Amino acid sequence: MADERIGVVAILVENERHSAPRVNAVLSEFGDCIVARLGVPDVASDLAVIAVVVRLTPARLGALTGRLGNLPGVSVRSLLTGEGARRTEGRSPHAGNIKTERDA
């Protein structure tokens, strides 16, 4: 989809033993837009931190974070690239914009 962007969703899960299955169920529903996922449980404090890299529209990001944020014991924050951020042949869109001392 033309409006899709890359982003990151940070999820803090308190009472991990109780909330994690619900978080996983929501993430499974959005599995088609998940690029990567990293989960770090802290068993001693019954807490987990999950970082999810996504490719989706802003509306779909709102749906995902809204669903997660409504779960008890779950806090969510997200970051999404701007409208102009597009993939360019495997290069960073900012490649070539960096000047070195030699260029000055």
Image (cartoon, rainbow, N blue to C red):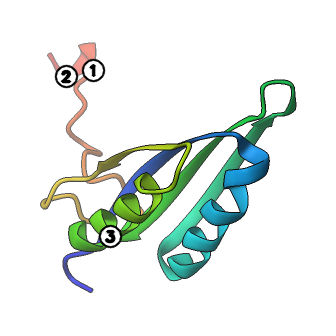
Q: Residue at x 40, y 69 (%)?
A: 55
- Can residue 79 be seen here? yes
In this rendered view, identify the residue nearer to me: 102 or 19. Answer: 19
Three-letter amino acid code of the residue under disc 2: Asp
Q: Residue at x 36, y 47 (%)?
A: 78
* Residue position for label 3: 63
The residue positioned farthest toward the bottom in the image shown: 1
Three-letter amino acid code of the residue under disc 3: Ala
Give above or below for 104 relative to 27.
above
> Judging from the image, what secondary structure is the residue with disc 2 in?
helix
Q: Earlier in the sequence, mark 3 or mark 2?
A: 3
Q: Are marks 1 and 2 in contact (CB under 8 Å)?
A: yes
**Image coordinates for residue 85, horizontal then vertical, percent:** 21, 58
Labels 3, 2: front one: 3
Q: Which mark is residue 10?
A: none
**Real-space Cα separation, disc 1 to disc 2, in angstroms:** 5 Å
**Image coordinates for residue 66, horizontal then vertical, percent:** 34, 61
Quadrant occupied by the C terminus: top left
* Residue position for label 2: 103
- Residue 48: which quarter of the image? top right
| 77 left or right, relative to 33 | left
**Real-space Cα separation, disc 3 to disc 2, in angstroms:** 46 Å
Give above or below for 103 relative to 69.
above
**Image coordinates for residue 52, horizontal then vertical, percent:** 54, 54
> Judging from the image, what secondary structure is the residue with disc 3 in?
helix
Three-letter amino acid code of the residue under disc 1: Thr
- Can residue 89 be seen here? no
**Real-space Cα separation, disc 3 to disc 1, in angstroms:** 43 Å
Q: Residue at x 74, y 39 (%)?
A: 40
Q: Few, some or many C-alpha atoms within 10 Å of disc 1 (few <14, some 14-19, many ≥20)?
A: few
Q: Earlier in the sequence, mark 3 or mark 1?
A: 3
Q: Which mark is residue 100?
A: 1
